[in-house]
Every structure is written in C-alpha cells, then in structure tokens.
Image (spheres, coloured by chain):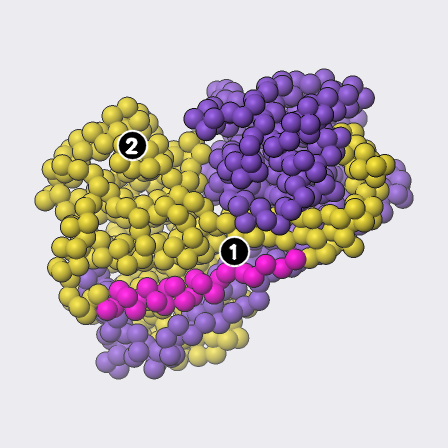
Chain colours: A yellow, B purple
C-alpha cells in the first residue's frame, strides 16, 4: 500500500503511472501457433489441449448432451440468478438501439444510418482461476440482440476435458450457436482462420492472458476485428466524509482479488475515512480465500488524501480508470466532471460487483488508460452503422454546383463529371 | 476490365478477391522515424520536411497570418461551397447524437450512458496528387460537434513550405485548434509522442500512403487509438434495366481515378445496360485528366452480368464494398438486403461524389472488406460512451442475492462480500 497525503499536482504524473507491462517476446510463439492451426486445424487444437490443458478431447465441439448435463449440474438458485442478470443486461443493451433518423440536409437530399449486425462473432472465455460465465452474458446477450447470425464461443477444457457447467448454461440461454473446447492463442487462431469444426469470424471478443491478448492483436492481420486493447483491471474510489469505510474497503478488495496486477486507487477528502478504510482493508483481507492475490495487488495500490473532491475528480480524469466509484453524498454534482472512465458507480450502494454481474451495464471495459479513447462493449460493438443516401433529381440540382466546385478544387474531374453528366441529362 | 457473364456461385470467392496488398517490410523504417521524433522533436520534423518533401520550414506550426492569407487565395464560390458542405455534414452528424436514456433494470437500479468527447484528437491530411480539404471537413466537423477540446491537424508542406489554402480554410472554419506542417510517418509519430510544438493526442484520424498506414498501426503501441484499418478505395454498382449507362460509367470512373489500386465492380441484370456501360466507360475515360491512373485501376475492375438483383445483392454482401450504389428503380425493396457495406447510394441521382463531398454523410469508410466488421467515421468515433449506475439501498436489496450467488459461483468472494457487507449494515 502506498500512502500519499495531499500530494502536489507536480507529483500526479508519477502517481497515475501504471506498472509497466512485461512486453515479453511472445510474437514468435503466437505466429507458430497460428501456422499450426492453419495447417492442421482441429487436430492441432486437440493436440494443444493435451499439451497446455492436460486434457483429452476427442472432439472439439461441445455436444448437446454435454450442455443438457451441465444444466442438471448447477443449482436452480444459480440458474435463476443467471437468468435475472441476463434480463437486466438485455434490457439495458436493448435501450442502446437508436431509431433511424432520416435527415434532409438539402432539399431532395436525404441521409440516414441503419444498423447491421456483424454477421459472425467469436467469444473467448478464459479458463484459469475463475470460471467467467458472467462474461458469457456480457458478450452473448448484446450479440444476440444485435442479430449476429453466428455467435461462437471458445473456452479451454479442464483436465477431464469438460467445460464449467455455468459457462455452458449461460451460453445456451444467451443464444450462442456453438461452443468449442479450445483455449489460449490457439482458440483465437481458430476463430480467425477457421478449422473443420470452427468457423472463422469477423470479430473476436473477450478477456484472456498475455497469449490471448497477443493473439487477438495478431489476428487483426487477417482482417479480424477485436473488442478493444487489454490490460489489468482497475478501480478508483473517490470518497467524501459520508462514505462508509467498510464499503470502500470491500470495493477495493473486490478489484484486488482479480489478479496480482490489478490496480486499486482510493482517494478521499476525509482523514477519518482515509484511516478507517485502510484499517478495514487489512481486516477484510484476512478472510478472503484469494487473499494472497489481493495482498499482492494491494502492494501497488495508492491511498491518497486530497483537499477537495474537485481535485480528486481531476486526478481521476488523468488516470482514466476502468471503474470509478463516487462514494460521495451529492454525486449528481460531480458526474458532469467525469471525462475519462469506463463505468461509473454512484453513491454508497452502487458497488462494482453490481455492474460486474447483474445491474445491466457491460463489464467489458477499457483498462490501462484506454478509457481516454475507447468505450466499453455495448450493442454498438456488435453492429456496423451503415449510411444511406437518396438524392432526387431536384436534390442533385440543389447540391450539384457545390460538389462540382469542390471536386474541381481537389483536381478530381471524374468526381465532378459524375455530377455534370447528370445535371446535363 | 474483366468481363464475367452469369458466373456460377462457386466462382464468386475468386471474384471477390482483392489484389494482395504489398506488405513491404517498412516496420524498421517506421520504428526509426518514431525514435528520431522522440529524440529530436520539432528539429526532426523540420529535417524530414527537407528530406521527404524538399521543403524549408522554419517553423512547424502554421501561423495566423498564413491562414488569413490562404483565405484570400481561394475564390468566394469555393468558400461558399465548403461552407455549404460543412453545414450538411454538421446537420447529419449532429443527428447521430443519442439522448440519455435512464433505464431502471430492477427496482432501485438505474443505468444509463453519457457521451464524453475524446479530449485530444489528431487529423492527418495527406499531400500528394489531390489536396483533400474535403477530408478536413469529414473529420473536423464531427470532432468539433463531439466537443473535442484539442483538434490538431498535420499535413505535409509543398516545396515552398506552404499548405494548400483550401485545407487551411476548411480547418479554420471547422474549429481545428492548431495546424502543423509535417507529413508521412513522422507526423503520426509527432501526434503519438508529442514534440515541442505538437501535443500528443489520444486518437488519430485520416488517410495516407503505406507509411502513414503503417505508422498509425505502430502508434497503437503507445496507447493511441486510430479511426480504422486502411486499404484502397472501392465502389460496387448494381444496376437494373432502368439504370443510365452514362451515369454508371461516370460513377465507376470517379472511383477509378482515386489511384492505381482503386477497386471498381459493376453488376447488372440487363445486357443492354451491361454493354452500354462498358462503352461509356471507354468513351468518358478519354477526357479525364487522371486517365492514366483510372485506366490502370480499370484493368482490375470487374463487369458482371447476373440473373437477378437478389444474386447481385448476395455478391455485394460477400464483397462488402466501401461504397455501394444501387442504380435500381425500386431500391427501397433492396435496402434491407444490404448487410455489409460502408455507405449506400440509392437511385440514379445519388452519385458517390455527393457523399464524398457535400450530402452530409461521412466519406471516411471501411475498405478492403472491413465493411464486414467496421463502421465508417461518425460522431461516435469522437466520443466515449461511459456507463453510469445508481443503486439505492432498496436496489441493492433487490439485486443483492443474485450478485452474491454469481460471485460465489465464480469463486470471487471479495466481489460477494462487497454486497454482503452492505446488506448486513
């Protein structure tokens, strides 16, 4: 834990520094994996499952009976919870759809945009320490709402060649077309290039380790789009004197348990809240199953005292956190000041977990400062917005001279001629 | 020109093949240019101007008097045309703004999105054979509408160290904050890293040659976002028996004159329209100042006869053209079939030039098949959509159990605890 009391502005640049990500030279490995998948298809994936996941997988595709079995293996309570989360996520993302607005910019010249789904999308769900079925919801629900025709999902099998049942259940009820047992860079290669079982897709979504991240970057050479660049998860909490230290501590820890490299920043104007939150973090940490991971990530965390909430907001905008919690009584007065953040949680009862799972907002958000230039995943991420225009004869007469003048000034006479020839006719 | 009469579907995959882009190994050069700019800043840019553009530029920044002088050097007619285009572009892009919708997904749980401008954006305008002041409009107008605080523009100087006056005029009236005389990969490096004169930006927009394209790709390593991946410009025209061959030919040529590598495809169901369009292309080509470039690009163009408009639409969706012209009488019946395209032009009077310059739609569009997974530039490109949520105490009571169940099933107990501790309080 790093403690900063009233740091002056000239020190802020250091405080917002993220730990430098190890840029290990793995591009050679990634290239080899892509080549192997291109050459041997499914056979390569089965082999990688053996090598990397110690799993025997006869077939890459998950069968309907495996999905049925999974459904029986999870509790009714959890199923009900997953369905409730799905409804909220669907509700919020459906509201992001924009009605078509036809604009007559000049008399007889009508322009508008229409959404069209990205036809084929791939979702990657990592294996590892947590079975992220919530990420299935966050990606498959908007894909389905957008009307994507083919929604496939890749995730690594466990040692018994199985997929976590909650992942299968979430995939099933969110309209995923097909599920495949393959993980890591090879899963990204398969979705980019296609194999006998796995269709190639136009856009790949989802989190992953450094190999997955590097593979998603590499996949773009094959014309595949990705959701966004990746980095470790982060939260920044701003608290005033009305914040509850126990709540703030719980939120900081829920971020810290994500991984060793998670980023946690706490800023308050109140000395008592400051001290009590630090104490509460220490106290709560002891009871956490993942306390080793959380402790590690807390080593890099910053606890900052500032004079004013305005200063805290300014600091936050410089840092551009993935998650921003405003544990401030009159948060309404401060939302307009938020310029760079992925998702914002307002007041004492809006914990980050709510958005991580079930409130309806998406949890796939820009990290590592990318909140300055990227949005989180939304319905928009699964559609293209295509512009349409219709000019009547009258419309072209009204606008033609302008187009001719501009085309001529750019020296593009065929552009001009496309207008002139119509005006003459 | 390649002629295909009623090609069977099994041959389509070959017909939609784009010419393979020369992937020359220029990454070494790009890296050196970035290093040079990082080390020597403005001095490096002045030196590159000498070396690459044969230009002496005492200072990199364009001065107010240069802008004033430019304004006097272009005709009132052109100024009026540029202002009219600006109004239409502003009208159409302003209509893309979405009002804030607060959604109560569960009683007491309210979620919404708010737009925030990308604070600093950079626009690149190439030099070369055409002074693309229209691209200044297409990028600066939505940047300004979005509320970007810093909108800078880089463009290479001519041999006299000057910038084309129409570019300066367009930049001035569209709210560009500052203009700099630097081009190529070094301009992209300067906007990514910053120099004494040029501020670093969060997102870079605009077209360019292979060095600029490679530099934009490289810039992403420094956390900078870019508008979209690039490729040669394209048009696909679908015509029925009511299309006007002279018009179709003019549209095809206006695409072909862009460059040697421009892609042009013509598809019709009518034999007469087919033959007459080919003749009209030959005839019109002769009178074009840029006919050498257009001829070259026509060598790779395809003229295709199909049985039905439906088949033509299917072909177009496979190809995913940047520009799609539907020179079809009852185009309304076909717009729903458009699944992959950048921008669509409907009927006999909606020439591509209209959208290139002045109708209001954006001309920065996905090429090279990227219309399958990317949208063109719009107001959205200049904002982040930040999600906000507020849970009341009651809201968390209603949703808490669901969050706890899901967090526990993912093995993330600190996430669960952030809810439990609040429910207990």
Answer whether labels 2 and 1 touch (C-beta < 8 Å).
Answer: no
Residue under the image location 45 percent in, 72 percent down: B103
Provide the residue span drawn in magenta.
Answer: A80-102
Lateral position of residue A242 relative to residue B52, left or right? left
Q: Nearer the viewer, residue A233 or A279?
A: A233
A345 lies above or below A292: below
In this view of the protein, which residue sits in the foreground, A15 or A157? A157
Image location of residue B195, percent across then percent down: 60, 39
Identify the residue shown where x is 55% and y is 41%.
B341
Residue beneath disc 1: B384
Say if B30 sits above or below B422 in the image.
above
Q: Helix, strand, or loop for circle 2?
A: loop
From the viewer's perspective, is B417 left or right of B111? Answer: left
The question of residue A94 being in magenta is answered with yes
Count numbered badges in the picture: 2
- Whether residue A245 is visible: yes
Front tag of 2 and 1 = 2
Measured along the vertical axis of the image, is residue B409 above or below residue A168? below
In magenta segment, residue B114: no
User: Does the magenta stretch mainly form a helix, a strand or a loop?
Assistant: helix
Q: Read off the chain for label 1.
A: B
Where does the image place residue A382, in percent across and percent down from the top left? 44, 50
Residue B128, image quadrant: top right
User: Looking at the image, which residue is at 13% across and 55% down?
Assistant: A69
Q: Quadrant of the C terminus of chain B?
A: bottom left
Q: Position of residue A281 (x, y in %)?
A: 25, 67
Q: How crowded is mark 2: few (under 14 residues within 10 Å), some or many (20 or more)?
A: many
Residue designated by label 2: A195
Position in image of residue B132 (x %, y %): 72, 35
Q: Can residue B70 be seen in this view?
A: no
**Could you tell me which chain the residue with mark 2 belongs to?**
A
Q: Distance between the residues labelled 2 and 1?
A: 36 Å
């Amino acid at each position: 834990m790093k403690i900063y009391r009233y740091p002056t502005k000239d020190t802020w640049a250091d405080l917002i520094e993220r730990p430098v990500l190890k840029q290990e030279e793995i591009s050679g490995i990634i290239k080899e994996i892509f080549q192997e998948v291109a050459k041997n298809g499914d056979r390569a994936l089965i082999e990688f499952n053996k090598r990397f996941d110690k799993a025997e997988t006869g077939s890459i595709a998950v069968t309907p009976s495996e999905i049925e079995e999974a459904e029986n293996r999870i509790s009714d309570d959890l199923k009900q919870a997953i369905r409730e989360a799905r409804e909220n996520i669907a509700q919020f993302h459906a509201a992001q759809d924009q009605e078509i607005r036809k604009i007559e910019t000049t008399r007889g010249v009508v322009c508008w945009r229409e959404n069209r789904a990205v036809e084929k999308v791939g979702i990657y769900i990592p294996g590892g320490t947590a079975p992220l079925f919530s990420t299935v919801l966050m990606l498959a629900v908007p894909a389905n709402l957008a009307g994507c025709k083919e929604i496939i999902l890749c995730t690594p099998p466990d040692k018994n060649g199985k997929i976590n049942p909650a992942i299968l259940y979430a995939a099933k009820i969110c309209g995923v077309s097909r599920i495949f047992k393959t993980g890591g860079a090879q899963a990204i290669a398969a979705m980019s290039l296609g194999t006998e079982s796995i269709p190639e897709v136009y856009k790949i979504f989802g989190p992953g380790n450094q190999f997955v991240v590097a593979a998603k970057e590499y996949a773009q050479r094959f014309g595949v789009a990705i959701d966004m660049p990746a980095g470790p998860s982060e939260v920044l909490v701003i608290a005033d004197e009305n914040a509850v230290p126990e709540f703030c501590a719980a939120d900081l820890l829920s971020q810290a348990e994500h991984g060793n490299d998670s980023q946690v920043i706490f800023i308050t104007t109140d000395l008592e809240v400051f001290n009590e939150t630090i104490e509460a973090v220490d106290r709560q940490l002891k009871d956490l199953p993942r306390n080793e991971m959380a402790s590690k990530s807390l080593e890099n965390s910053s606890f900052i005292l500032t004079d004013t909430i305005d200063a805290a907001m300014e600091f936050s905008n410089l840092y551009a956190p993935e998650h921003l919690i405003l544990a401030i009584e009159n948060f309404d007065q401060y939302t307009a000041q938020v310029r760079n953040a992925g998702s914002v949680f307002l007041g004492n009862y809006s914990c980050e977990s709510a958005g991580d799972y079930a409130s309806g907002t998406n949890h796939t958000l820009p990290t590592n400062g990318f909140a300055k230039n990227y949005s989180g995943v939304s319905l928009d991420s699964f559609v293209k917005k295509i512009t349409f225009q219709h000019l009547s004869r009258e419309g072209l007469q009204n606008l033609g001279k302008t187009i001719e003048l501009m085309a001529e000034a750019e020296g593009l006479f065929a552009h001009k001629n496309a207008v002139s020839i119509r005006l003459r006719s």
